[in-house]
């Protein structure tokens, strides 16, 4: 049970994103069915589907950063010899920490100042925009973690994992 909870915690962006993707898919399929076969549409369906899809995108972005699945960062890392990778990871983690921390702050200000509401449901767009704050907050935390790990490897000469345990991300936990 503890292993399953740990795996859930490590992959929570994927599970939450999957939930939002399920919502998007079901709403779009139902709306297409009702439009073509029953000749009506739900006026709120597009708003919910788009909002849920925005959450999918930002949660996927945070998970892709955490699991080092962003192709630009990986290509750059693979171009450097094995010995220099911790230094490059340290520098990129420092840059990403500053940029994502700044985006976290700016997206928070944007959400806090948002007064726009959706047309059909008349809900605040804050429920959609908060996904930016959430994603950039996670990316800031992950980049700080990678920064500390690479610092330990470079300056303390401790051989530590720089990325997330692949067993927790892709398969079952084995101890």
Image (tube, rainbow, N blue to C red):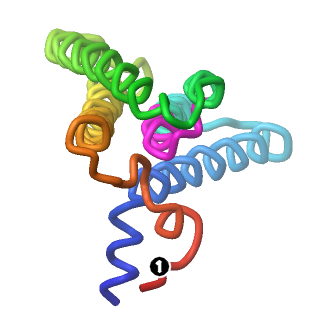
Q: Position of residue 40 (x, y in %)?
A: 71, 37
Residue 21 image point, x, y percent: 57, 48
Check disc 1: other Cα within 10 Å, few if <14, some if 14-19, many if 20+: some
Q: Which residue is mark 1?
A: 173
Please determine whether, in this image, residue 124 is positioned above or below residue 172: above
Q: Residue at x 67, y 42 (%)?
A: 28
Asked if residue 122 can be seen in this view, the reply is: no
117, above or below 74, in the image: above
Which residue appears at 55% of the width and 25% of the height? 73
Q: Is residue 10 visible?
A: yes
Q: Position of residue 54 (x, y in %)?
A: 49, 30
Q: Residue furthest bottom?
A: 1
- Viewer-proximal residue among 17 and 142: 142
The image quadrant that residue 107 belongs to is: top left
The magenta segment: 58-70
Q: Quadrant of residue 132?
A: top left
Q: Position of residue 65 (x, y in %)?
A: 47, 36
Q: Assign the C terminus to one quadrant of the image.
A: bottom left
Query: Is 55 placed left or right of 70 in the picture?
Result: left
């Amino acid at each position: 049970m503890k292993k399953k909870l740990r795996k859930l915690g490590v992959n929570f962006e994927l599970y939450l994103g999957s939930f939002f993707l399920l919502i998007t898919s079901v709403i779009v399929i139902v709306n297409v069915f009702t439009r073509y076969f029953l000749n009506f549409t739900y006026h709120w369906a597009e708003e919910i589907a788009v909002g849920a899809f925005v959450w999918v995108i930002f949660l996927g972005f945070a998970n892709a950063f955490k699991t080092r699945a962003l192709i630009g960062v990986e290509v750059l890392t693979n171009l450097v010899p094995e010995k220099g990778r911790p230094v490059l990871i340290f520098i990129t983690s420092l840059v990403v920490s500053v940029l994502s921390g700044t985006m976290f702050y700016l997206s928070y200000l944007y959400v806090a100042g948002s007064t726009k509401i959706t047309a059909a449901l008349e809900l605040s767009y804050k429920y959609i925009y908060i996904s930016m704050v959430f994603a950039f907050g996670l990316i800031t935390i992950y980049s700080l973690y990678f920064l500390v790990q690479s610092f330990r490897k470079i300056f303390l000469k401790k051989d530590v994992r720089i990325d997330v345990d692949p067993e927790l991300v892709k398969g079952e936990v084995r101890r």
